[in-house]
Amino acid sequence: MKEKSTAEWQAADAAHYLHPFTDFKSLAAKGSRIVTRADNIYLWDSDGQKILDAMSGLWCVNVGYGRRELIEAATAQLKQLPFYNSFFQTATPPAIALAELLAEVTPPQFRHVFFSGSGSEGNDTVVRMVRRYWDIQGHPERDVIISRHNGYHGSTMAGASLGGMWGMHAQGGLPIPGIVHIEQPCWFELGQAMSRDDFGIKAAGWLEARILEVGPDKVAAFIGEPVQGAGGVIVPPSTYWPEIQRICDKYGVLVISDEVICGFGRTGHWFGCETFDFRPDLMTFAKGVTSGYIPLGGVMVGERVAKALIEQGGEFHHGYTYSGHPVACAVAIANIGVIRREGLVERVRNELGPYLARQFEALAEHPLVGEAQTCGMMGALQLVRNKASSESFDASLEVGMVCRGHCFGNGLIMRAVGDRMIVAPPLVMTLGQIDEMVALIRRCLDLTLADVKQRGWM
Ligand code: PXG
């Protein structure tokens, strides 16, 4: 590709490229940061600035950048068979081998997979599959799926409908029919009057209340992320998911775990449902399955649903051109190989996760931080105006964006969700690199504090 200067890239970008989740006009005025290369946990931009990527690309580069094994797997597969589909009584060896491998690394109820190209497509598959399941059971009226406010399940029509982001619903006539929401298990926002454990039970109770309101004979499934990622790394109390499972079992409601972020080691187990001790019937995955090197997603289908689909379902009228793309599947196999050989899941559970948790406990002392939470290799810092009373800043001040601006300027990528600053760094970090990241975070918090005081906001 022809090299351009930063200004030339920015001009061409502003002229032609509509970015996702972006105010196009305001970005064109500011100019994009152009990322040109990466290695391990670092990125470099077109001005040569080195950046520590504490978001793993977008929650996905679990094994870090520049991994030879993944690059070689893609290259070899591109030469051997760059594409063939899985329709019309056909399959390719990488897709079959990955299906077999996923059955090995996922919880025992999962022996089948349906591939998609992304997490959103995976969740569209979930909606169609769940409704098909109840159809086959002779209960087509059981078509309501319950989801949560501030959950994120993608940006397609079904994905955005399942998600509980009201801004997304306001554009394009969403949610689609048959999707309803309950409140999220966010203790900081909704539960501070009680213990975390009591709040977990209370928040799960909102599901039972909604099932009774809709009618248990109408409810098909409940979907949630084990830890809400895009919503701000909201780690639920440990009592929450077991209670959700109990309620779903009581009413025969299917449980769907959206593992697009939590899957493949992020929480310290292969899947978030193992960390939080529940037993989903379906599990959406994407991102970490290939460490983001190439798009791939899918749905793990537990025996309850798989048996019905296979034995009684007839043709399932659903699928994508890239379902089981051989190059993507070859990369996923190499990626899972790296995770296994390097014991990354165990490292997150036993070493990196606990270390990150201790560093975040120390960051919780900072005057701007009202709450610090981590789970495995993900973490959140809630910025507050008054630490003692947990009083928030006025949302219109966009303090999170001020902090993100300092991160940008200091070679650190950290995401701002409102006033919640979040990280989800690669699972291959050394302890020294965690120290380096935390030192950068601390510096950016200090700069934000000075900024906020100077503006008279605190
Ligand atoms: N489910 C979950 C839990 C996700 O986090 C999706 C589904 C959709 O996956 P695709 O591959 O279709 O994007 C996601 C995606 C953010 C951010 O701002 C998070 C995601 C995507 C874009 C931005 O944190 N997660």
Image (cartoon, rainbow, N blue to C red):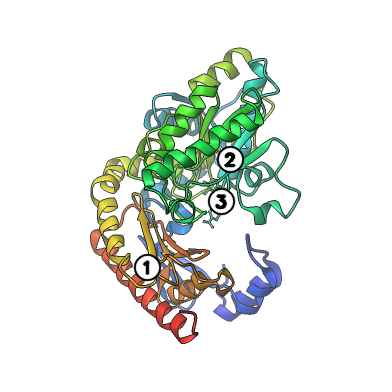
Three-letter amino acid code at the position of disc 1:
Ala
Amino acid type indicated by mark 2: Ser
Query: In the image, which disc is placed on residue 388?
Result: 1
**Mark earlier in primary sequence (3, 1):** 3
Above or below, comparing residue 444 to residue 150 in the picture: below
Q: Secondary structure at mark 1?
A: loop
* Quadrant (top left/top right/bottom left/bottom right) for the C terminus: bottom left
Gap between marks 1 and 2, in whole Å?
33 Å
Three-letter code for the amino acid on which mark 3 is drawn? Asn
Determine which residue is flagged by label 3. Answer: 150
Instruction: Single out the mark in the foreground, 1 or 2.
Output: 1
The mark that comes first in sequence, 1 or 2, is 2
Q: Is residue 297 visible?
A: yes
17 or 425: nearer the eye? 425
In this view of the protein, can residue 98 be seen by the observer?
no
Name which quarter of the figure residue 111 lies in: top left
Q: Left or right: 85 with respect to 428?
A: right
Which secondary structure, mark 3? loop
Residue 284: % across, % down: 52, 37
Q: Which residue is mark 2?
A: 147
Classed neighbour count for the residue bearing mark 1: other residues with Cα under 10 Å, few (<14), some (14–19), many (≥20): few
Which numbered disc covers residue 324?
Answer: none
Residue at the spot 62% in from the left edge and 28% down from the top edge: 219
